[in-house]
Amino acid sequence: MTRRELIGLLLALGITSPKALSRAVEKPQSLYDLPPYGDCTLLYLSDLHGQLRPHYYMEPPNLLAPRSLLGQPGYLSGSAFLRYYGIQPGSPLAYLGSYVDFTTLAERFGPIGGAPQITALIRSQQQAAQRPVLVLDGGDNWTNSGPSLRTRGAALVDWMNLSGFQHMVYHWEYTLGRARVEELEKRLKAQVLSYNTTDDAFGDPVYPAYAIYPAGRYTVGVIGLTYPYIKVSHPEEFSEGLSFGIKEPQLQQAVDELRSKGVDAVVLLSHGGLPLDTALARRIRGIDLILSGHTHDLTPVRLRIGKTFLVAGGSGGKVLSRIDLALRRGGIADLRLRLLPVFSRVLPEDPEAKALVERVYRENPDLLEPIAQVESLLYKRDTLYSTLDELACRAIEAHYPETEVIFSPGTRWGTTLLPGEALTLDRILAYTGFTYPEVYVFKLRGEQIKGLLEDVAANVFTPDPFYQQGGDMSRTYGITYTLDIDAPLGKRIRELEVRGRPLEPGREYRVAAYGGRLQRLGRLVEGLAPRPIHVLIVEYAKQTGPVNLPPRPNVRVPERNYHLPGGNG
């Protein structure tokens, strides 16, 4: 980055006084200087999803919700997010937390994330805190990227080790397979915490439920919550022999045990998601702070639910959350939250982490080879539709032209590509990096297709967080329908058409899907060998050339304002 470019970025970040600008130019990391505060510091990262290099990530244009949850944290997007948190449009926080003017702000502030930058930031904050520091990971770290797949998670474990993480919790990590997870745990220096992971054979806990740390005159206890619905969200063979679940009584027991041991502040490191964590804050006695992961929400300010503080850490390495705790006997007297943006153009790179990342990509040079030019914004996250999902579906259709209906999973992870960037395998795997990537073609009756969509909608739009079992709506191609979010169970999907014709309940349709278990519902079509989705996308992009996919949602939502990128939200 040139000096001129750096000055331009600093001005965009709001550094305008000559003295501050001069200092920031000479030492860009000074932008992250914070005076010591309180008795203990937590450095919190969540939902990295294996992204080792700087990238772009646009927040969802839509976070649709049932009427009773509208306007609440966890369901805020675009201008509603900015208004709720009092964020100035065009500011760094607006770029980090909203899709509004995303392309313009991406050009202004540049890519986010990068393992070397995060490591450098962790180390500088540890030095600056002058207090006991805990470095915590909220889960979904090891998987869903090219480096993760090529090293079977090892690159991410090595990075966590040199970055000094002390505790973590799990979710997608289990898609590496239980045996591989246990292998990596022998290599991992951090300790896994989980009150809700038990062995099927005897019901014994697999991991410690909590850990206790001194903080001057006080003590802090950290409890771990593994994603409760791993058995639902992934093929069960990956976590064979294990049970999960919310297990409220066991959580309350862990909190009570810490209190009985004289712990002053109880922190829940959770991969339950912001809606569920909000509900737990209301139902579990004695939790002082919840660090929330899984739903990729970002809370620019601390939330307060009763006596419990709540902080959600975003995703993709956008920010490192610094939480400084001023403690008192039996609780937290005050809490200072600072979101530390991982602006890759500003932060220095840690040499060890940089060498690790360079080695991974040197050993896998095909990950960064250009495949096609990108001419339109390609994004993943949204409740119903994304252009990256449409790209995947078009690639499936090109390879299996006999398919009539195509499903693409509504996962939250995946980076964003700006017009003018190159599509690479690295970026394709950033949203298709499954350990079970095969595309299957099978037959389903029309009534099964509708029933499947109703089941997914029942999960996504249930007003009770205890029954939300992960992800957004499955993306579809070849069909259109109307979604009535607030309709009774089984009546949310209306006016469903396949290739422009009304769905016939009794007719069999040829369906393609990947990244799940939908093929088990139907009869596989003989003679069509399953192929990995990322391979099909590479082949399609090479054949068709530049990728230009303006957003064309195929779902109507008459009772909600549905937004597209490029608007003001």
Image (cartoon, grey):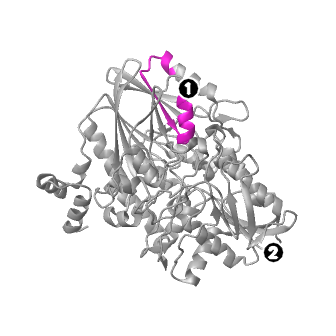
* Secondary structure category for the residue under label 2: loop
Q: Amino acid at mark 1?
A: Ile
Few, some or many C-alpha atoms within 10 Å of disc 1 (few <14, some 14-19, many ≥20)?
some
- The residue lying at 69 percent from left, 52 percent from top is 456
Start and end of the magenta stretch? 258-284
Count the marks.
Answer: 2
Looking at the rendering, which quadrant does residue 198 occupy?
A: top right
Looking at the rendering, which quadrant does residue 361 occupy?
A: bottom left
Q: For this view, does 436 lie left or right of residue 311? A: right
Residue 519 location, x and y as percent? 77, 61
Q: Is 180 colored magenta in this rendering?
A: no
Q: Which residue is mark 2?
A: 527
Residue 102 location, x and y as percent? 41, 63
Residue 308 location, x and y as percent? 46, 29
Q: Which residue is mark 1?
A: 284
Query: From what the image shows, is residue 543 above or below residue 253?
Result: below
